[in-house]
């Protein structure tokens, strides 16, 4: 895991090396100061030699200034390195997520991915900065100060040994108890983010059903859980401070008492040496305090590091073949004995029981218009998602243009298959910017023509800024029907060989639906069109209609033939006709 994370330091390796190098210089200079101070007291102050005091005072001032400069440079290099490390991690995670298949995306919640790219990366970024500065400074300072203490008085240095053992035991207790709690805390952040995201995304539904109180309670429960976990962790971590202060003051008292006896009674130590020992005491124990804080930070960041590496190590379940095909011949589609399951179970019999598509065998010619009808849960959306290889089949094969979709370069295949998903998504930006997702190089005239085909031009023309009207995130400032038509226009701009509409006209009236289908027939006759619909009126003019029932093909024929021979289709048709008659 550490090797994996270190690889993302990248172009900031120089800063990562310079920061601890400057820290080492800073520490060496700081350790020299108490020795000089002892010399000033013993040879300058006590002997009344002011020239000696002045010379060494100026030297101490220069060393202090050099130490300050080294510390400032170290901070600058560490900040640059840690910010760059965080940027590289976020970019690597984001790039990897972009390559995820639908199967990979299903494994992670949206809130979980957001937490990993924000809170977890920030934790790791701070930990990295602390490691390249404090993790270098504290041990070197502690060892250097200990060496100086032993040089001054080896017997008195035993006080530090006892302090180190005591603090080491306390530190081990804190870190082993705190780590599991921090793990739970980050899962709590995931739940909190999920609650906020759901509420803000569906705020109109919340208000429509007067569920504000319920959402408040759910949010409060998530924050209460996070608060309890934070308090539990903080109770452990906070022990570090009072224990450290107790140890510092105890060491100072012991050194004062024993050192005073050595000066007054045994004359084995000078006043200056005792004063320098006090300074080294503070340096040693402050270094220990820093080390303990670093341990706590690393403990917290370990959970974050594991979650980040989990995303970085996730490999797309869909990959290009060794020698991919870069040209799709035409829009013909062939399903050959296809079985598909979302399950990942290794037991084939258990996976077979969970198949959502079974024994699907059909052939669609290039340029045909195919309607797809079926009840809820009949796997209509799953079927069409196999065509652009959003998922891979378990058994059998799906062929486009006469070749298995697994033989194509994924980007090439998906550029030839335009898909308007069941859940229409628009991004923040102008209408033109949203349309150009289909073709970045499309002219405004091409965008207007696509909107005319999708019956969207009329309502766009009535907007104050026309095609330059700004769309809010998620398309909240346009209606459901308008959003659907904009998504259809966006798909048409790709000029695909296959166009898939997954229940994408459900929010438009029957007249607009009819005009859209007429435009398809006249303007893109060579494009294979697959139209999933709930209304038979939306597909009855199709060349053929596919009827799905619980993941199996129940019928595949013309509207008239299905009415005559397919009971499921006939029942749906009669039910919808009866409903239409009652509405009239």
Image (tube, rainbow, N blue to C red):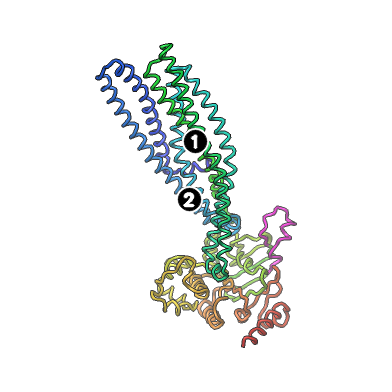
Residue 153 vs residue 451, the one in the foreground: 153
Name the residue carrying label 2: 90
Using the rendered view, name the quadrant where residue 583 is placed: bottom right
Q: Quadrant of residue 283?
A: top left
**Residue under label 1:** 241
Mark 2: few, some, or many residues within 10 Å (few <14, many ≥20)?
Answer: many
Which of these two is toward me, 568 or 497? 568
Q: Which residues are magenta?
A: 340-361
* Foreground: disc 2 or disc 1: 1
Label 1 element class: helix
* In the image, residue 349 lies in the stretch drawn in magenta: yes
Residue 175: percent from left, percent from top: 56, 37
| Image spot of residue 191 (x, y percent) | 57, 55
Q: Does 577 lie within the magenta span?
A: no
Q: How many dots with numbers? A: 2
Between 27 and 531, the residue placed more toward the observer is 27
Could you say where residue 40 lies in the image, as x and y percent from the top left?
A: 31, 20
């Amino acid at each position: 895991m550490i090797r994996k994370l270190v690889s993302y330091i990248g172009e900031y390796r120089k800063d990562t090396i310079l920061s601890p190098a400057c820290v080492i210089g800073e520490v060496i200079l700081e350790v020299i100061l108490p020795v000089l101070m002892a010399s000033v007291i013993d040879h300058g102050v006590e002997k009344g030699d002011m020239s000696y005091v002045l010379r060494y005072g100026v030297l101490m001032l220069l060393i202090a200034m050099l130490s300050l400069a080294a510390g400032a440079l170290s901070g600058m290099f560490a900040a640059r390195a840690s910010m760059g490390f965080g940027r590289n991690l976020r970019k690597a995670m984001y790039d990897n997520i972009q390559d995820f298949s639908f199967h990979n995306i299903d494994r992670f919640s949206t809130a979980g991915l957001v937490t990993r790219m924000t809170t977890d990366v920030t934790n790791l970024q701070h930990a990295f900065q602390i490691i390249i500065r404090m993790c270098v400074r504290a041990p070197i300072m502690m060892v250097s100060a200990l060496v100086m203490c032993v040089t001054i008085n080896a017997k008195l240095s035993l006080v530090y040994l006892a302090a180190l053992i005591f603090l080491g035991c306390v530190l081990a207790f804190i870190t082993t108890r705190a780590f599991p709690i921090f793990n739970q805390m980050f899962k709590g952040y995931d739940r909190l983010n999920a609650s906020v995201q759901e509420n803000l995304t569906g705020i109109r539904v919340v208000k429509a059903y007067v569920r504000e109180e319920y959402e408040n309670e759910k949010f409060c429960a998530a924050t209460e859980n996070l608060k309890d976990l934070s308090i539990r962790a903080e109770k452990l971590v906070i022990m570090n401070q009072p224990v450290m202060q107790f140890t510092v003051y105890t060491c100072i008292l012991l050194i004062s008492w024993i050192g005073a006896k050595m000066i007054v009674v045994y004359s084995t130590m000078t006043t200056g040496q005792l004063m320098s020992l006090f300074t080294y005491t503070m340096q040693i124990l402050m270094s220990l305090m820093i080390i303990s804080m670093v341990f706590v930070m690393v403990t917290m960041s370990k959970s974050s590091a594991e979650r980040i590496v989990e995303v970085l190590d996730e490999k797309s379940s869909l990959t290009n073949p060794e020698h991919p095909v870069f040209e799709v011949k035409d829009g013909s589609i062939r399903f050959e004995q296809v079985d598909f399951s979302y399950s990942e179970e290794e037991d084939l019999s258990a996976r077979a029981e969970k198949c959502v598509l079974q024994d699907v065998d059909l052939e669609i010619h290039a340029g045909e218009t195919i309607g797809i009808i079926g009840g809820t849960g009949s796997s209509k959306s799953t079927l069409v998602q196999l065509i652009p290889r959003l998922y891979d089949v378990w058994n059998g094969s799906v062929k486009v243009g006469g070749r298995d979709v697994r033989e194509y370069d994924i980007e090439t295949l998906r550029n030839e298959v335009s898909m308007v998903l069941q859940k229409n998504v628009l991004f923040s930006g102008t209408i033109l910017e949203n349309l150009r997702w289909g073709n970045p190089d499309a002219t405004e005239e091409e965008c207007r023509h696509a909107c005319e085909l999708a019956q969207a031009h009329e309502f766009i023309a009535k907007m104050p800024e026309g095609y330059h009207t700004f769309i809010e995130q998620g398309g909240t400032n346009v209606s459901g029907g308008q959003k659907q038509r904009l998504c259809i226009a966006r798909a048409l701009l790709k000029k695909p060989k296959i166009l898939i509409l997954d229940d994408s006209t459900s929010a438009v009236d029957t007249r607009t639906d009819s005009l859209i289908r007429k435009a398809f027939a006249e303007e893109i006759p060579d494009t294979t069109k697959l139209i999933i619909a709930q209304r038979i009126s939306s597909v009855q003019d199709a060349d053929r209609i596919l009827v799905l029932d619980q993941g199996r093909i129940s019928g595949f024929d013309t509207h008239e033939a299905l009415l005559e021979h397919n009971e499921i289709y006939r029942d749906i048709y009669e039910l919808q006709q009866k409903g239409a008659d009652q509405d009239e």
